[in-house]
Amino acid sequence: MADALMVFSEMEMSAEHFIWDVLGLSADDGKLVTQIETKEKIELAKKLSHRYGLPLHRHARTTADAWSAIRLAVEARNKMAHGIWRMIDGETPIVVSYRIPIEAGRINSEHFPLDRIEAVTSACLRAKKLFDALCARIATEGRPKPPVPAPTPNDPEFSKSDEWS
């Protein structure tokens, strides 16, 4: 489990660096922007990836699968790190969470066998490599130009005859 949590942290740091690089932020400013919950940070990275035309992978299906795997890894990591670990019959590891809403009188628990933990580790390693590749691309090719903003609608409040002075 420790490997999964450490690799997850490395993946999260690579996602942060991608956000900083694509926005052209210094480390100090980048830290301010990425001091948000992990789910929101990954969503921000995904939106910036789309907005600036920097997909995680050149194949759309691989990109979609990678974002799904990252989302699942975030959920699994939160359960592993914040849940209460128990063993059933001395053999089956489960994680119990009182935070996740479920019907009254019941608690949420999930089976976390070694192969699931290893799958989280592998997904995080792959995602880290994809984020690192995007950062290397930005370092080599330069920061992408921001997309052209949509035209401002013709709003009578902002007519050309209005004076702002």
Image: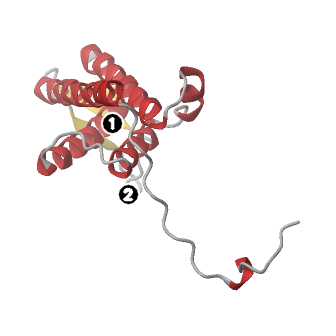
Q: Nearer the viewer, mark 2 or mark 1?
A: 1
In this figure, what is the number of numbered marks? 2
Q: What secondary structure is marked by label 2?
A: loop
Q: Position of residue 23 (x, y in %)?
A: 48, 37
| Gap in angstroms between the C-alphas marked 2 and 1 | 23 Å
Location of residue 77 by image quarter: top left
Q: What secondary structure is marked by label 1?
A: helix
Position above or below: 23 against 147: above
Q: Residue at x 43, y 34 (%)?
A: 19
Q: Residue at x 35, y 50 (%)?
A: 106
11, 110: nearer the viewer: 11
- For the C terminus, give its image quadrant: bottom right
Q: Residue at x 45, y 43 (%)?
A: 40
Give the residue type that dot 2 points to: Glu
11, 26: nearer the viewer: 26
Q: Earlier in the sequence, mark 2 or mark 1?
A: 1
User: Residue at label 1?
Assistant: 74
- For the N terminus, give its image quadrant: top left
| Residue 107 relative to residue 112: left or right | right
- Check the image and name the residue furthest to the bottom: 156
> Dot 2, crowdedness within 10 Å: few (<14), some or many (≥20)?
few
116, 62: nearer the viewer: 62
Q: Position of residue 73 (x, y in %)?
A: 27, 35
Q: Residue at x 26, y 21 (%)?
A: 4
Q: Position of residue 110 (x, y in %)?
A: 24, 39
Location of residue 102 by image quarter: bottom left
Q: How is the image coloured?
A: secondary structure
| Residue 140 relative to residue 160: left or right | left
Position above or below: 3 against 163: above
- Check the image and name the residue furthest to the right: 165
Q: Position of residue 43 (x, y in %)?
A: 40, 46
Q: Which mark is residue 103?
A: 2
